[in-house]
Amino acid sequence: MKIPYVDVATGLLGSQYPLPLDQPFTRAQALSAGISARELSELVSQALVVRPLRGVYVASQTPDTPLLRARALRLVVPEGFVVTDRTAGWLHGAPRILAPNDHLAVPRVSMVSAKEGNRLRNKLTNSGERAFGPMDLTVVHGIVVSTPLRTALDLGRLLHRDQAFAALDSLLRLGAFRWEELLENVERFKGYRGVVQLRALAPLADGRAESPGESVLRLRWLELSSMPVPQLQVPAPGPDGTYWLDLGVEASRFAAEYDGAEYHQSPEQEKHDERRRDHLRRIEGWTICVVRKANLFGQNQDVARLLKSGYRAALAALPSLGWSE
């Protein structure tokens, strides 16, 4: 189907498009503007329009900013509700805070009401009730939302353990609160669901983690009592500047890196990783354990075996390198 709103020169939506290009919109607004249901479906199919939230659309060429995200939320968040959990982290700009594979689907909005009995029930939202103190809430471009700290405390206790740990790392990475503040606030939730998990994970959280996969890899490493505690973002000299290893123990010249599909499957990225790791192995004496999605999350997870065997190999190589642990 030919879309009449596409600029031939750029391949993007152009001046014939009947809605503002910098504003999100609902299906009803699209129909009122003269875009047919079939045209809207085709715009989404051709990736000319994307759906950042359920029930909300926006031109794909529009820059993703906190203001745009807030405008999208205004279309689905009723008065008196507070945006929470993953949606709050998304609004604050926490990197890769949405659930696994949410980039392949359309996430629901997480929101709650502090008013007893005021609960939404529809397909667009995950809604409930929750108590907040004055310090727990903030306003972002007109949207009432849980603060980054309160969002971290909630996700750290309510999500599955792996996802909770990744969320804590991601929210710490924002720099909106300190690690010490996170620890100081854990006991506020004594007696609440998930506080035992929060107590265990909060002391291990670190904002230097660069992806959820890297966070979960670190958690698996920390679960191995026979392994030393890893450093994050370990620097190592390279021919054209400093190279950085995801996790490592410098004294043992052992490192582990997570190669996720998002950043490590293009031919260019694979070649860069090969050159970098070849240099670090041959010239700097590092033993590098490369972990992929199947190793970490697959049916036959073998990340513990990979880490332990890699660490043993690194220790065995130290004498030949002229080092000792």
Image (cartoon, helix red, strand yellow):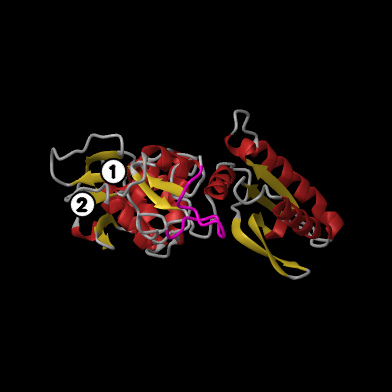
- Secondary element at tag 1: helix
First in sequence: mark 1 or mark 2?
1
186 part of magenta stretch: no
Disc 2 designates what residue?
Answer: 132
Q: Residue at x 48, y 44 (%)?
A: 103
Q: Residue at x 44, y 50 (%)?
A: 97
Would residue 183 be visible to someone looking at this image? no
Q: Nearer the viewer, residue 268 or 179?
A: 268
The answer to whether residue 192 is above or below residue 315 is above
* Quadrant (top left/top right/bottom left/bottom right) for the C terminus: bottom right
Most common secondary structure along the magenta stretch? loop
Q: Residue at x 37, y 63 (%)?
A: 177
The residue stretch that appears in magenta:
2-15
Label 1 and label 2: CA atoms lie apart by 34 Å
- Secondary element at tag 2: loop
11 part of magenta stretch: yes
Q: Using residue 225 as the reference point, say whether residue 134 is left or right of it.
A: left
Residue 84 percent location from the top left of the image: 30, 49
Q: Nearer the viewer, residue 97 or 197?
A: 97
Mark 1 Cα-neighbour bin, 10 Å: few <14, some 14–19, many ≥20: few
Q: Residue at x 63, y 36 (%)?
A: 294
Q: Using residue 200 as the reference point, say whether residue 191 is left or right of it.
A: left
Disc 1 designates what residue?
Answer: 28
Residue 290 percent location from the top left of the image: 70, 46
